[in-house]
Amino acid sequence: MRRPTLDDVAALAGVSAKTVSNVLLERPHVATATRDRVLEAVETVGYRVNRAGRGLASGRSGRIAIVVPNLHQPYFAETAERLILELAARGFTSTLRIAPDAASERDAVLTRTTADADGVIICPHYFVADFVDTALPDRPIVQLGGAPAGVVDTVVMGEREGFEAVTRHLLDTGRRRLALVWNPFSSGEPEGSRYEGFVSAHRARGLEPDPDLMVSGSDWDRRASGYEAIAGLIRTGRTFDGVVAINDAVAVGALRALRSHGLRVPDDVALTGFDDTDQAAFTVPPLTSVSPESEDMARNAVDMLLERLNGLDAPGRTRRTGAHLVPRASSAARS
């Protein structure tokens, strides 16, 4: 069966093929009545846009680059999948790029390694603003997660409120000596929105976190880091009755360390994560976590990018999404 062509649409609508092309490329200066007639003809004949040809005509590829630091961290893998599906629902294809260090992240933001994409959505580990202070990208960039960069659109998750909620949850179950398992920190103590939520929950109850219970492993965002951090803390002999991990991956490593050293979860030590990744519900016991409402984050990131592609010219914007506690057995009150 022959595929309908642009000429078929033009003949039915009573216009030139050039007019049909102008309508499909959403170019201005086409009368509303003509546009409606063309779109009706498109539906009638069953014409489907050739995206490759359209890309050549419009200067666009119909492709968006998704950039993440790694895929071994379940949060980044799940977020990449959500973005790919959300973009597909809007008619775009995706290119997935791994940016494991500052240099490769910079190259992605400045489109040196994403030149075939109409825009970039990046989940940064480093600070995007540092990369664009002297060289602005030549296409839309949206930052998903991390601190607002100011110069690019940013979707900010509810890190502080999420961490405050999970810390408050542990304190409400009677735990008082909470270990904090963090990414490696060189400043002497953790910092950022999640840490602020951890401290705020303590102070709301007249408590101060113990710096001696703030630990990290040799790497960031890996299960092995959580294991190293908690195994090292146990060896110091310091007592603790709860563990607040920076994310689910680190929490899974911490869970193994606790169990391998004869500590019961949650009877001896309660444990929580962050991100509410799929693995959280399948640990033993199931892991209490915080949902950063990733589907909402992905939807907002795609919305902001498409607004830019459709011509929005404005300073960098920030949209904030929520976060909520997902309690499971790993932090249940002592029986």
Image (cartoon, rainbow, N blue to C red):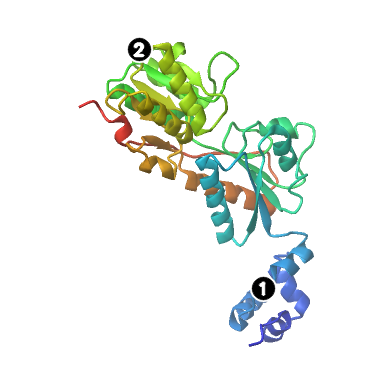
Residue 255 lies, with reference to residue 90, above or below; the image says: above
The residue tagged 2 is 206
Q: Secondary structure at mark 1?
A: helix
Three-letter residue code for mark 1: Arg
Query: x, y percentage for residue 26?
Result: 70, 65
Query: x, y percentage for residue 152?
Result: 67, 39
Query: x, y percentage for residue 42?
Result: 63, 78
Kindly indicate the quadrant of the structure image that contains residue 165. top left
Q: Residue at x 45, y 35 (%)?
A: 248
Q: Which mark is residue 35?
A: 1
Q: How many marks?
A: 2
Viewer-side residue, 157 vs 176: 176
Query: x, y percentage for residue 211?
Result: 46, 12
**Separation of residues labelled 1 and 2 (CA atoms):** 66 Å
Q: Secondary structure at mark 2?
A: loop
Viewer-side residue, 46 vs 80: 80
Q: Residue at x 72, y 42 (%)?
A: 108
